[in-house]
Amino acid sequence: MFSMAFIYLMENVKPLNKDIVFKHVEYLKELDGKGVLVLCGPFSDYPGGMVVFNATGLEEAIMVANNDPFILLGYKTYQIRTIEVANKSNNYGLS
């Protein structure tokens, strides 16, 4: 069971090509199929993108990010962040 939400923010290191984009999308589909993926996409105003996902802890989150072909094959670097989810069920973080 997932207990935490994470985001990895990616920054381009070298030019992308169709092959690496396809591999990245296949990886996202794999995460989605496992119920891990929450939200993802490229930035429209910055050369990079982000992946929001669920994991059991930081170690697993780093593994998820490191296995993304964009990162694994050196096309992007990343920073990972833990998200404290605020929503109606926890009074938007006040509970």
Image (tube, rainbow, N blue to C red):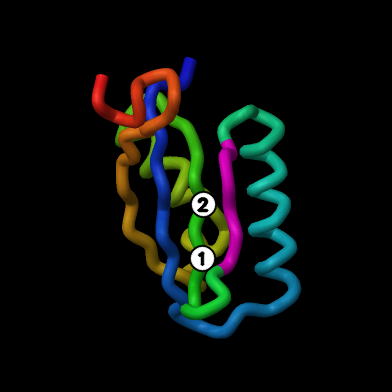
Across and down, in percent, residue 17 comes to: 68, 79
Q: What residue span does the magenta drawing correspond to? A: 37-42
Residue at left 39%, top 21%? 3
Residue at left 50%, top 82%? 14
Are there few (<14), some (14-19), or many (20+) residues within 10 Å of tag 1?
some
Q: Of the numbered discs in the image, which one, if any, rests on residue 7?
A: none
Amino acid on which disc 2 is placed: Val
Q: Of the numbered discs in the image, which one, if any, rests on residue 51?
A: 2
Q: What element does badge 2 sit on? A: strand
Q: Give left or right: position of 62 versus 12.
A: left
Are there few (<14), some (14-19), or many (20+) residues within 10 Å of tag 2?
some
Q: Are marks 1 and 2 in contact (CB under 8 Å)?
A: yes
Across and down, in percent, residue 94 comes to: 25, 26
| Foreground of the two, 7 or 22 | 7
Across and down, in percent, residue 66 comes to: 44, 51
Indicate whether residue 69 is drawn in magenta. no
Q: Which residue is mark 1?
A: 49
Note whether 21 is above or below 23 in the view shown: below
The picture quadrant where one finds residue 89 is: top left
Note whether 66 is above or below 47 in the view shown: above
Q: What element does badge 1 sit on? A: strand
